[in-house]
Amino acid sequence: MPPGANATPVQLKTFQLPEKVTGSIADVAMGKEMVETWRRDGIFQIEMTPGQGEILKKAYMISKDFFALPAKEKVKHVDDQSFSGYIARLVKLLILLVTIESALDTINHRYSGEEITDGVADYSEIFTVTKDVSKQDPRVRQQWPCHGPCPWPNDKYKDLMTSVMKHFEGSGDKLLHLTALGLALCHETSLQELTDDGWHHMRILRFPAMNKTNGKGKAGRGIGSHTDYGLLVIASQDHIGGLFIRPPIAGEEIRNWEQSAAGKNEDDDKWTYIPPKENVLTVFPGDMMQYITSG
């Protein structure tokens, strides 16, 4: 656990997803157990397939190469219509099927500090991958928000990250199906239908070493406490780690769409630290899931 962190290390419940979700008795039982684990711990893990593990290793390496580029090169890769590309968190790291966030924790970058959580600068660089829509698409021509081309650094990065998204698409689909079964929804595919042709995205984050920050943020904090706005978050962290989760607490209600959760309770001792573990992904519901299921 990072030095000075006020949290309790925990080992998460880990699930192995079935080859196919059919709505069987076993699927319903797994879905119920997943939902109950979220209600108790706020998060769980799933085992990666060998193919997912291999593609993630390549994604980590190529992303480290990108973040090592000079700042003047990285800031060229931004698109203000699709909201994809590079964020230095001053110049202004789920994998995301419905939202996949992959935390790539490495060394410092002197331009970190652009994004803000609860009025305090965060210490991360980010490359966001959104739906890559051609400039010739009618929606892009009409300037629809969140629609536009992704400003890839190069074709190799594009091909690999597109492959990452495809590798995790099936896992996200299974998780949504199992969640619907666990919640006993009338239509077991309703959550999947909500994401059909949706605005799925992935964020690749890079954090500085704690002793190599630029002083613009808060000591020991990579990103301030927050909730994630998506429907489902599937996250990966490297061997360094740095993921903290706040489990559900009796009497505490967080509804980010009514009152911002940014920075809330981040200095108390009720957080859990998730040690990095090979070949697993962490999974937790976002604000959208909380909203449409009434908690």
Image: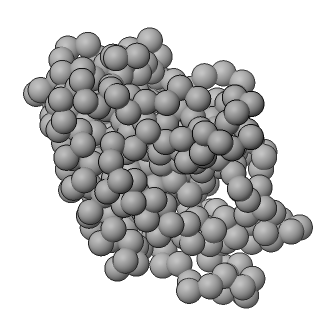
Above or below, comparing residue 30 to residue 289 in the picture:
below
Q: In which quarter of the image is residue 22?
A: bottom right
Q: Measured along the vertical axis of the image, is residue 194 above or below residue 144? A: below
Residue at position x 26%, y 13% in the image:
216
Q: How many marks?
A: 0
Q: Where is residue 24 in the image (x, y as percent from the top left)?
A: 73, 87
Image coords of residue 130 (percent x, y) = 54, 44
Horizontal and vertical percent position of residue 122: 34, 23
**Can the viewer see residue 13 in this picture?**
no
Residue 221 place in picture, x, y as percent: 29, 27
Screen quadrant of the C terminus: top right
**Residue in the picture at 40% in, 16% down:** 92
Residue drawn 38% across the image and 39% down it: 127
Residue at image point 66% right, 21% down = 259
Q: Which of 101 and 12 is in front in this view?
A: 101
Q: Can residue 208 be seen in this view?
A: yes
Residue 11 figure quarter: bottom left
Return the residue nearer the eye: 117 or 160: 160
Question: Along the horizontal axis of the image, is 129 left or right of 220?
Answer: right
Tell me the quarter of the picture where residue 31 sits: bottom right
Farthest right residue?
186
Q: Which colour scheme is used?
A: one colour
Frontmost residue, 225 versus 204:
204
Query: Residue reaching furthest left?
Result: 211
